[in-house]
Image: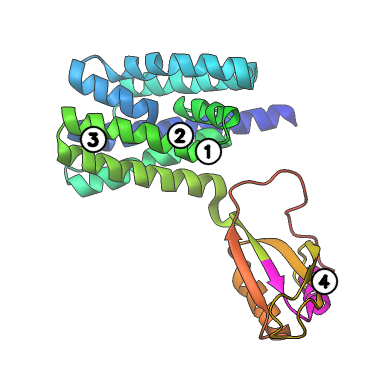
Amino acid sequence: MNVIKTVKEFITIGLGILSAGFGLKGFLLSSHFIDGGATGVAMLVSDISNVAISLLIFIINVPFLWLGYKKLGLQFAIKSTLAIGLLSVTVAVVHFPDVTHDKLLTAVFGGVFIGTGSGLAMRGGAVIDGTEIAAVLVSKKTQILKVSDFILILNVLIFSMAAFFLGVEPAMYSILTYMAAAKMIDFILNGIEQYSGITVISTHSEAIRKAITETLGRGVTIYQGKSGYGKDGHINDPRDIVFTVATRLEIPSLKQTILGIDPKAFIVQQSIDDTTGGLLKRKGLH
C-alpha cells in the first residue's frame, strides 16, 4: 500500500512539473511576464541578467529547501528537491510550443498552468516554489502574519521590482498571472470539497439536528446559548445552537432542509481555511 501511495505521489508531482513547465515556456517566458514567489524572482533575475532561468529556479530555492529539511523533515526535503530539480531540467530541455502572443491570454493561462503545477506538487507532498516553505515557518513563529500575509507581502515586493525593471504593463500582467495561479492552487488543493462552517440558531434546534445527522449524514456540534433579543421568545431563553461543516455543494440542500423546518432560522455561513482532527466525511446513510 505504501508503494502504491508513493507511486501515486510521484506521478502527481510529475504531472505538476510538466504543467508548471508548460506554463513557463508555453506562455510566460516569451512575453517576459513573471509569477510570484521564488519562481517569479528567478524569472525576473533571468530577464535582467540573462542567466539561464533553469539554473536560477534551482539556486534560488536552495535556501528554502534547507529550511524545509531542518523544519519539515528529510522526506519532504527530498521530494521537494527532486521536484524543483526536475522542473529546472524540464525548463532547460523540454520543448513546449509558444501557444499565444496575446498578452491577456498569456497572463491568465500561464498562471493557470503554473498554479495547477504547484497544486499537484503539493498534493504529492512536495513544493516547486520554496517561498511556501518560508511562509509556513514564518506563520508558526509569529501570530501577526498568516501564511497568506507573508506571501502577499513578498509578492508585492517582487511585482514592485518587476515594475521598475520590466515596466508597469508587464508587472500588471504578471499580477494577473499570480492571481490566476493562486486560484488554481486553491482549486487543486480544496476543489469542490472546500468546507464551510454553518451555524444555525433556531427554536427548532433538535429537529434541525436530526435532519442534519439522519437525513444529510453530517455530524453536528451543539452549543448552549441564550436568546439575546427576544424576537422568537423571551430574552435569556436557553437555546441550542447547531454547528456543522459541509462542502459547498451540500450547502444549498442543507439550507433548504433547515429553512423547511424553521423558515425563521438564523443561519451563519463562514469559509474554513483549515481543520485539524474531527470527522469531516459524510457518514453512510442506510
Query: Residue 193's mark?
Result: none
Q: Amino acid at mark 4?
A: Glu
Q: Nearer the viewer, residue 141 or 179?
A: 141
What scheme was used to colour the molecule?
rainbow
Q: Nearer the viewer, mark 3 or mark 1?
A: 1
Q: CA distance from mark 4 to mark 1?
A: 37 Å
Using a 10 Å C-alpha cutoff, classify the residue at mark 3 as few (fewer than 14 neighbours), some (14 to 19) or many (20 or more).
Answer: many
The tag earlier along the polypeptide, 3 or 2, is: 3
Residue that appears at 71% across and 84% down: 262
Using a 10 Å C-alpha cutoff, classify the residue at mark 1 as few (fewer than 14 neighbours), some (14 to 19) or many (20 or more).
Answer: some
Which percent across, then down, holds residue 167?
Answer: 14, 34
The tag earlier along the polypeptide, 4 or 3, is: 3
Residue receiving disc 1: 146
Residue receiving disc 4: 214
Residue receiving disc 3: 33
Residues marked 3 and 2 touching at CB (< 8 Å): no
Task: Indicate whether 58 appears above or below 230.
Answer: above
Residue that appears at 45% across and 21% down: 84
Task: Indicate whether 101 appears above or below 82.
Answer: below
Q: Main secondary structure of the magenta part?
A: helix
Look at the image and give the residue range highlighted in magenta.
Answer: 199-213
Residues marked 4 and 1 touching at CB (< 8 Å): no
Magenta-colored stretch includes residue 184 = no
Q: Quadrant of residue 50?
A: top left
Asked if one can make out residue 100 in the rendered structure from this viewpoint, the answer is yes
Which percent across, then down, holds residue 105?
Answer: 24, 48
Q: Nearer the viewer, residue 233 or 150?
A: 233
Q: Amino acid at mark 1?
A: Lys
Q: CA distance from mark 2 to mark 1?
A: 6 Å
